[in-house]
């Protein structure tokens, strides 16, 4: 689909909405009149979950401030045909021209099917799944390399820990989670060669009870900085704060949950991408099909330092952020895994190298097992 | 309680119009039966109305307009062709999982294990289909998937039924616990030996492929699961009300000891009802895999089994009534999205409404038999 087509459609839609008062825009007629674009955002959980969904909701708020953009949001949409119907409803009833599907399991088959069914609507999905050979051209992916921000967490944590043990509560042993754990280790090792990372997998994305138990067990094991990769880090951060240890966040800002021990946290900055889409559509530019990046693209960020961060940690973390922006590699090979001692990363890889997306190991220095 | 009577009048008129004129018009027998039966329409209708009023108060309390709410429910769930098909599609798994609660309820068992049977049935269907994909044609594979899904679901809930009969284990608890075990089994395989290696970030089985998927009902956007659910509701209604099996099951549900004393095969009846229930839920799992997901993964455990409990209770465990109630719920869920988007209400709003409906409806159970209008003359009941 050419951009010209898109803008013509958007123009016609807007005009129709304002003047003819079509059924699809009855309720939003006054606002739709000024809007050139309606963006539909679909969340798998609650928008105020202190985690993955909140990170997107924060960006949605930023997108709402862009003149001419109307945002419609729906939360707690499961990864079943419910999400297909939600997208369809946003298109049919709200006149959405861009759909942002934010949960991993939305993509196949739902986003792909809807993109085929509605070729004039743009679909973007928050995981690197779009395949340029197979998938429709009006679909696409956007993704942030959060491990860069976790690396910064690791640098700060490495200087804040006294026991040299950092605890990590992880959901599932999949590539993106493993990369975050390994990045925390490499960040910590950068400033504190004695640091180790101890990891506990809970087995699923949202297991509040097990997450609390895991955080507590890590504290019992001597970890004095706790971080995590679960959908909503709320429970982990609160448990650690209660146990009197320091914390690094994940996904969104958890700073309010840990007024004493919060150091910093790895956050997505989806607003960069969302505003970019809106600007492209406003200028009738083609929408990029695949966006992926980290600090160098301004897609990730670290939460402002909390009371738990020491001055040394702040200085080192700030320097690490500058490194990330300058594409200084995290994975400096050769690196061994923690199970067999075999070299798994043979050389130094760029931070966005696809080789690293296939990660299925924990590096030496991480205590824990993926099996 | 005078508020109940005008509604009752209207509804009995409707019921009269619907009722086939087979009953002798002259006899007071028909009128009596009509009045007695209209109680089962009037009281739930009254309960729904009360729930709606309570919910309106709730909306007013948080500063939102109940009229907008009704408008969006209509528009999002029923008002357009797209919306209504959306509703029907969402109601399809609910019909099947509600049947999985309704059938055991007729024999006096509160089985809430439909979720587990759905997940395992769906998983089993995918597991058996994956090795067949490629060399067996869909015409062979699909029946095999259906049979597998139904059989696995039937065995799963059947276990709870057997434990109830043979060991006196509380079937509500055991069926619920079996649900967690079922989900864990599915996860075990999907994250282990059956995992599709090409999908590193979401553990799933391999896809079964488009050729092996169940299509849509022609001319609609609704998959065949809906039609199958409706037909099954009718068939099971017939089974439970018009056959000796159904009669024996209801007798057992009414009085277990009496059924035993009569020499009814109570054990077989209980296990059969549990297995029918599990089969329905397993079938729902088949449709989730073969009509929606195309593979088995954790998304199968989407809560349909639990919403089905609500639907079945609202339908008073009547297989025929399950269909309209499931559509009502499908509509509420379908319009829930529009309500979130337009009224900027959290998703929990629709849950509040569902909860209110459930509580008011259960409370209304105590009203049966208390209104003279439905039971005009005591002691002159038909025998």
Image (tube, helix red, strand yellow):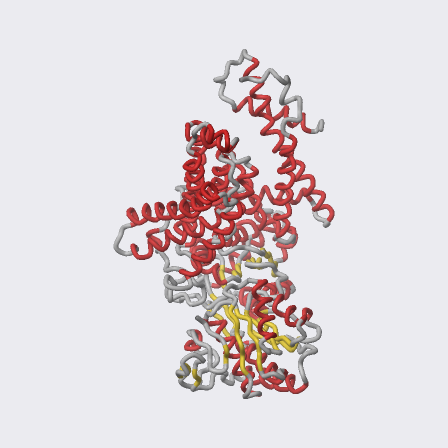
**Residue B63, image x and y in percent?**
73, 49
Question: How many numbered tags mark residues here?
Answer: 0
Q: Position of residue B39 (x, y in %)?
A: 60, 27
Name the residue furthest top. B26
Residue drawn 51% across and 63% down?
A: A204
Tell me if I can see residue B82 in this picture.
Answer: no
Q: Quadrant of residue B381?
A: top right
Q: Quadrant of residue B166?
A: top left
Which x, y percent locates residue A358? 42, 74
Q: Is residue A306 left or right of residue B208?
A: right
Is residue A369 visible from the viewing direction of this image? Answer: yes
**Along the line of sight, which residue is nearer the eye, A71 or A245?**
A245
Closer to the camera in the image, A331 or B300: B300
Q: In the rendered view, would you say A161 is above or below B98?
A: below
Determine whether, in the image, residue B251 is placed left or right of residue B355: left
Task: Please tell me which residue lies in front, B217 or B202.
Answer: B202
Residue A209 on image: x %, y %:
58, 62
Question: Residue at (43%, 80%) from the top-left corner?
Answer: A337
Q: Residue at x 49, y 84 (%)?
A: A329
């Amino acid at each position: 689909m050419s951009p010209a087509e898109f803008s013509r459609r958007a123009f016609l839609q807007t005009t129709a909405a304002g003047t003819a008062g079509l059924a699809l825009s009855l309720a939003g007629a006054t606002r739709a009149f000024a809007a050139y674009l309606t963006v539909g955002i679909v969340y798998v959980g609650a928008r105020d979950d202190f985690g993955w969904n909140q990170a997107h909701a924060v960006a949605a708020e930023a997108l709402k401030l862009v003149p001419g953009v109307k945002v419609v949001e729906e939360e707690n949409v499961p990864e079943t045909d419910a999400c297909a119907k939600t997208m369809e409803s946003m298109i049919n009833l709200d006149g959405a021209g861009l759909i942002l599907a934010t949960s991993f399991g939305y993509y196949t088959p739902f986003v792909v099917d809807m993109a085929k069914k509605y070729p004039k609507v743009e679909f973007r999905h928050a995981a690197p799944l779009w395949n340029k050979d197979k998938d429709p051209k009006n679909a696409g992916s956007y993704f942030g390399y959060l491990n860069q921000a976790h690396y910064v967490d690791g640098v700060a944590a490495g200087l804040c820990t006294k026991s040299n043990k950092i605890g990590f509560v992880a959901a599932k042993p999949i590539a993106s989670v493993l990369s975050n754990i390994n990045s925390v280790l490499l960040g910590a090792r950068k400033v504190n060669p004695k640091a180790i990372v101890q990891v506990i997998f809970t087995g699923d994305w949202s297991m509040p009870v097990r997450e609390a138990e895991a955080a507590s067990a890590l504290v019992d094991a001597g970890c004095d900085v706790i971080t995590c990769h679960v959908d909503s880090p709320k429970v982990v951060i609160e448990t650690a704060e209660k146990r009197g240890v320091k914390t690094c966040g994940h996904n969104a800002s958890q700073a309010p949950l840990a007024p004493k021990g919060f150091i910093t946290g790895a956050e997505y900055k989806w607003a960069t991408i969302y505003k970019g889409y809106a600007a492209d559509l406003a200028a009738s530019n083609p929408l990029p099909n695949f966006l992926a990046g980290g600090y160098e693209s301004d897609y990730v960020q670290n939460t402002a330092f909390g009371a738990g961060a020491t001055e040394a940690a702040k200085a080192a973390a700030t320097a690490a952020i500058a490194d990330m922006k300058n594409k200084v590699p995290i994975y400096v090979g050769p690196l061994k895994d923690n199970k067999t001692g075999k070299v798994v990363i043979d050389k130094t890889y760029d931070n966005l190298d696809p080789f690293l997306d296939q990660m299925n190991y924990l590096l030496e220095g991480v205590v824990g097992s993926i099996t | 309680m005078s508020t109940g009577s005008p509604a009752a009048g209207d509804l009995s008129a409707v019921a009269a119009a619907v009722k086939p004129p087979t009953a002798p018009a002259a006899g007071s027998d028909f009128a009596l039966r009509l009045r007695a039966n209209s109680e089962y329409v009037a009281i739930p209708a009254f309960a729904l109305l009360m729930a709606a009023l309570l919910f309106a108060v709730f909306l007013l309390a948080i500063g939102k307009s109940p009229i907008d709410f009704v408008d969006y429910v209509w528009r999002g769930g029923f008002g357009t062709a797209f919306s209504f098909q959306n509703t029907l599609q969402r109601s399809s798994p609910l019909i099947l999982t509600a049947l999985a609660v309704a059938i055991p309820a007729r024999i006096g068992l509160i089985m809430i294990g439909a979720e587990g049977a759905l997940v395992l049935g769906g998983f089993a269907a995918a597991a058996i289909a994956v090795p067949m994909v490629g060399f067996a044609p869909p015409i062979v594979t699909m029946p095999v998937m259906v049979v597998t899904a139904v059989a696995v679901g039937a065995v799963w809930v059947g276990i709870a039924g057997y434990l109830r009969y043979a060991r006196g284990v509380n079937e509500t608890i055991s069926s619920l616990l079996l649900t967690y075990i079922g989900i864990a089994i599915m996860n075990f395989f999907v994250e282990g030996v059956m995992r599709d290696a090409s999908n590193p970030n979401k553990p799933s089985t391999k896809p079964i492929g488009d050729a092996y998927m169940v299509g849509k009902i022609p001319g609609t956007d609704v998959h065949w699961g809906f039609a199958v659910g409706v037909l099954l509701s009718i068939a099971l209604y017939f089974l439970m009300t018009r056959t000796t099996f159904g009669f024996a099951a209801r007798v057992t549900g009414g009085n277990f000891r009496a059924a035993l004393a009569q020499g009814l095969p109570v054990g077989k009846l209980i296990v059969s009802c549990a297995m029918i229930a599990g089969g329905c839920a397993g079938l729902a799992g088949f449709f989730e895999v073969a009509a929606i997901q195309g593979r088995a993964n954790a998304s199968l455990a989407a809560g349909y089994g639990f919403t089905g409990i609500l639907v079945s209770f609202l339908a008073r465990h009547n297989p025929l009534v399950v269909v309209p109630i499931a559509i009502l719920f499908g509509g509420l869920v379908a319009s829930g999205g529009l309500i979130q988007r337009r009224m900027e209400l959290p998703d929990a709003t629709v849950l509040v409404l569902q909860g209110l409906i459930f509580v008011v409806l259960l409370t209304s159970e105590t009203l049966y038999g208390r209104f003279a209008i439905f039971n005009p003359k005591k002691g002159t009941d038909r025998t």
